[in-house]
Image (cartoon, rainbow, N blue to C red):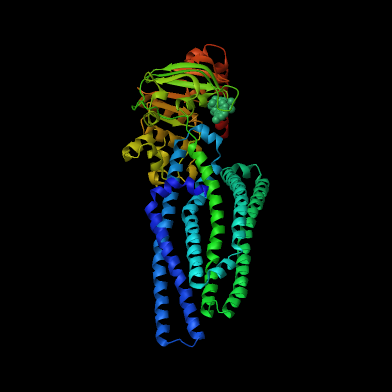
Amino acid sequence: MTIFRKLAWFFKLEKWNYLIGVLFLVLVAVLNVVPPKLIGNLVQEISTGKLTAVSLVVTLILLSAVGILQYLFRYVWRARIFGGAARLEKTLRSRLFNHYMQMDQTFYQEHRTGDLMAHATNDLQAIQQVAGSGILSFADSIITGVTTILAMMTLVDWRLTLLAMIPFPILAISAGYLGTKIHIAFRKSQAAFSRLNNKTQESIMGIKVIKSLGQDEEDIQDFEKLVDQTIKINRRVNMLDALFNPMTTILIGVSYMITLVLGGSFVVHGVINIGQLVSFISYITMLIWPMFAIGNLFNIMERGNASYDRVNLLLHARSSIIDDKHAVKKRATGDLKFDVDTFTYPGDKQSSLENVHFTLPAGHTIGLVGRVGTGKSTLMKLILREFDDYQGAITVGGINIKDYALNSYLPSLGYVPEESFLFSDTIKNNIKFGDFLATDQEVEEAAKKSDLYDDILDQPEQFDTEVGEQGVSLSGGQRQRLAIARALIIKPEVLLLDDALSAVDGETEHEILQELRQERKDKTTIIAAHRLSSVMNADEILVLDAGHVIQRGTHQQLMSQSGWYQDMFHRQQMETKIEKEGELSAE
Ligand SMILES: Nc1ncnc2c1ncn2[C@@H]1O[C@H](COP(=O)(O)OP(=O)(O)OP(=O)(O)O)[C@@H](O)[C@H]1O
């Protein structure tokens, strides 16, 4: 019953639909009582030789009328109750999806994608069932049960009714007992389903790596192990489920036996007539459904309850990155001041940034370089407000970035990571993703600036070419340039390129950067790169090491001092030279 209390907010919203639904369930249940009575009367008339043609025709007409009315009434309650359940699913689905959209990176670091998918599919379905089949089983088992028992008591005999119902309390007790067991087993089954979901998703996404490393056999074995575990757990749920129905059949059988033995003796002693005994047996048959419905009800409620708790837990998780009441609702323009004393990822012990300070006047470009894992992306993530929990302050135009409304601040930024997510849509729609109002001409211009235009013209349907899931039909360099075009179309105040040119050749990189310098004279750009040629023309370059700035200055300044930058520049120049010589000799 707890789940009904938890869903009270929804039943209040839909009270009229549910009241009308239940009212029609009552009408159907009342009509259900009529046919056994009519048939009992008919049997009595036959056995006493009093049957007339008229009474036979009247009985048949009444039976048909009851059938037609029940058909109509069943339609009404189905539409009301199952319609309500569908609306609950819709409400929860939208709520959960909106919630996912609002959550911060910490949330996504704590929850696996497979789990989040399982919540959005399996769990929501289990909750929806409470508002549909659950309410139906609950209301109908009570209504049909009560009306049938009342009919048995009033139309036949109350003593026989009580005797025939002796096995019923056993059913109620065992339903409660099994319900608790099902609850525990169902929780385990849902967790197993999540694990299976995660495994399937990870294997499909990582299929190239799995195959290229020859790990397919091992992966299949891992998967099968997980499937076996899941099936074992689900078997327990099914076993508990399966215990209920045979038990109902046995208890109803006992009820039949009592009716036949004692009912027969009641007829012999003239307490009831043969017609009433026939009606009584039909009524016992009618009690089978409410009994099954109770078993079903426990099952649905326990599943729904476990699922509701899981979904609720997610819905109550709060994003740490939310708008303040007085959040500034304007585009973030002006100088960017980055003053972070220290930042540590949630759950990490070691800080990932320490004493990183720089000011980037509007229109300037800063370059971030350094070994792998030194904090370049982390610095960008803080500007992108993926994490807010750091010591220090980042301001744009003199306003702390935490004081901007997220919806005003984030659209002022254009972010291109090394591997951008592309939607399985056309090239045009992928570029327009940041601004669906952009004209075709603006899309073309963005493609030209990111040096992608000629590549697009070579595609079978040019701008209308579908890129496939995550852009599989494009090369790595094309995907990167498409992502740059997508960022440029929103004309961002701050453009963040996080190793976003790693897959394009030196010449293309040079052209794109020159284009950006022209285009973004008064806008700010941050470039993180491993190839130093990407940042050579920046107004300032920071060399990071283990989250600290170990060198800073312009390219000329850094080249005039010995250190990581100078060493790396010479090394990369050497590598380029060797590559070129190799190409020439191959020709
Ligand atoms: N989401 C995260 N949670 C915990 N630690 C993280 C997370 N992302 C990065 N780190 C850690 O922070 C440090 C800096 O990582 P970051 O990705 O910023 O380096 P990077 O300089 O951009 O590296 P690369 O050049 O390889 O892209 C690394 O030690 C990394 O392990």
Where residue 438 sits in the image (x, y, percent)? 33, 38
Report ligand 1 position as a quadrant.
Answer: top right
Q: Nearer the viewer, residue 310 or 521?
A: 310
| Residue 183 in the image: above or below residue 573 | below
Q: Residue at x 42, y 24 (%)?
A: 402
Question: In the figure, residue 310 lies in which quadrant?
Answer: top right
Where residue 166 sits in the image (x, y, percent)? 60, 64
Q: Is residue 580 visible?
A: no
Which quadrant: the C terminus? top right
- Left or right, 69 with respect to 171, comes to left
- Left or right, 534 with respect to 409, comes to right
Q: Is residue 100 visible?
A: yes
Q: Residue at x 47, y 79 (%)?
A: 41
Q: Nearer the viewer, residue 447 or 321?
A: 321
| Residue 359 in the image: above or below residue 507 | above
Where residue 201 sits in the image (x, y, percent)? 56, 45
Q: Nearer the viewer, residue 218 or 249?
A: 249
Q: Residue at x 49, y 54 (%)?
A: 129
